Amino acid sequence: MHATHLHQLSILIFGLLALGWLIQSIRAGAGLLKIPRISRILPAPGSALPRISILFAARDEAEKLPAALASLLAMDYPDYEVIAADDRSNDGTGEILDNFAHGNSRLRVVHIAALPCGWLGKPHALEMAASFATGEWLLFTDADVHFDPLLVRRAITLSKEKKWDHLTLLASVEMRGFWEKVAISYFVFCFMFGSQAWRVSDPKSTKYLGVGAFQLVRRAAYVASGTHKRLAMDVLDDMKLGKILKQSGFRSGIAAADGLVTVRWHAGVGNIIRGVTKNLFSLFRFRVAPTLACIVLILISGVLPFVGMFIASGAAWVFSLIAAMTAVIVQGEMIHGGGESRLYGLTHPIGAFIFIYMMLRSMVVTLRQGGVVWRDTFYPLDELRRGIV
């Protein structure tokens, strides 16, 4: 191809990338500004508040469980209970839960000895916990999540103001070290853009969201949407809880946690990579073609602009610079919202390569072993595909 034609093609490619980044960043920026911040919501006053059941599943969580459970039992809320499902734990999880329960009447422990056919461990454990709940509202969380004492009062206020049946909070992830922050900041960036989180609260939109760390659901809506029985074999049960509620006609909303919901997700980038192996391929319904298409899209949108800054010239270079800097600014602002430096936006292409590796690893490992291993239990791929919601 003639050099002039190559130059014109590069201008077109990088021009489209710059335009795409600018359009999407403006849309996302405007939408994200509308997402409520839970720290700015006044806690619901008084004692005449709806009863809430806080539910979580725990399997081999002896290390993180005590501190997280202590925060749940220290809530400043007049009428709540905590129901913990010990899901076939092999460590001291069950004993820890029982010891806490002996000293606190709010806590009830459900011990699960066996997993029925047709269920993943976590959805089954949450279904069991929910069956014992007595609250008007159900709050699903995880065994390693820490709550601020006034969190539930704020969440109830927001849910009532917005007339939401389902509220999920964008939890604050505790990150340590350079590589954790690089990997998680890009993961959060993809999560927010991929889910179009800013559209979840729009009842006219089909977009949905669910974060395992905090999902407050009106009990009547949970039952009417089918409970976790509909999510029995769906690896992404947290996300899909938001989906079945939205599909059932109930109103969902999201808010930023602002450090009032915190979780230490995985320690070290190696554990992050291993931790998402069961999840990422399932995002594409365990199909190879969409997974590879997403990888190509990431390479084009998230890596090529940075390459263009070194190989392009003239107008093409300017467009590549615009696209790259827009990506840096957007990711930098997202991680800054979690209290980290905006400079981590500069690691965008590094994060893209890490994320691509995560996706490829998830796909290859799942296909090679013919299914997913989750908490020491193997689930066949055929059953997982049939169970996707």
Image (cartoon, helix red, strand yellow):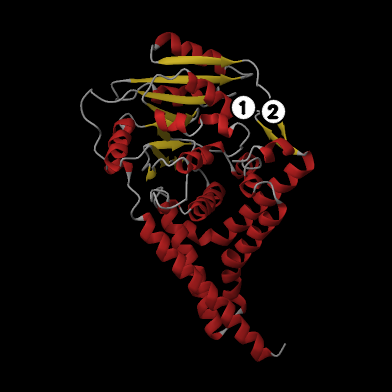
| Dot 1 and dot 2 residues touching (CB under 8 Å) | yes
Q: Quadrant of the C terminus?
A: top right
Q: Residues within 10 Å of mark 1 (few under 14, many from 20)?
A: many
Q: Secondary structure at mark 1?
A: helix
Mark linked to residue 121:
1
Q: Is residue 304 above or below residue 277?
A: below
Q: Is residue 19 above or below residue 224?
A: below
Q: Position of residue 281 (x, y in %)?
A: 66, 47
Q: Position of residue 161 (x, y in %)?
A: 27, 40
* Residue that carries the numbered disc 2 in the rendered image: 377
Which residue does the image show at 29% across and 37% down from the upper left?
A: 160
The residue closer to the viewer here, 207 or 378, is: 207
Q: Quadrant of the N terminus?
A: bottom right
- Looking at the image, the residue that sits furthest to the left is 46
Q: Secondary structure at mark 2?
A: strand
- Looking at the image, the residue that sits furthest to the top is 102
The residue closer to the viewer here, 74 or 340, is: 74
The kind of residue on which mark 1 rests is Gly
C-alpha separation, residue under disc 1 versus residue under disc 2 = 8 Å
Q: Is residue 341 above or below residue 130?
A: below
Q: Is residue 231 above or below residue 103?
A: below
The kind of residue on which mark 2 rests is Thr
Q: Is residue 63 visible?
A: no
Q: Position of residue 55 (x, y in %)?
A: 46, 25
The residue closer to the viewer here, 345 or 251, is: 251
| Lateral position of residue 167 relative to residue 274, left or right | left
Q: Along the polypeptide, which appears first: circle 1 or circle 2?
A: 1
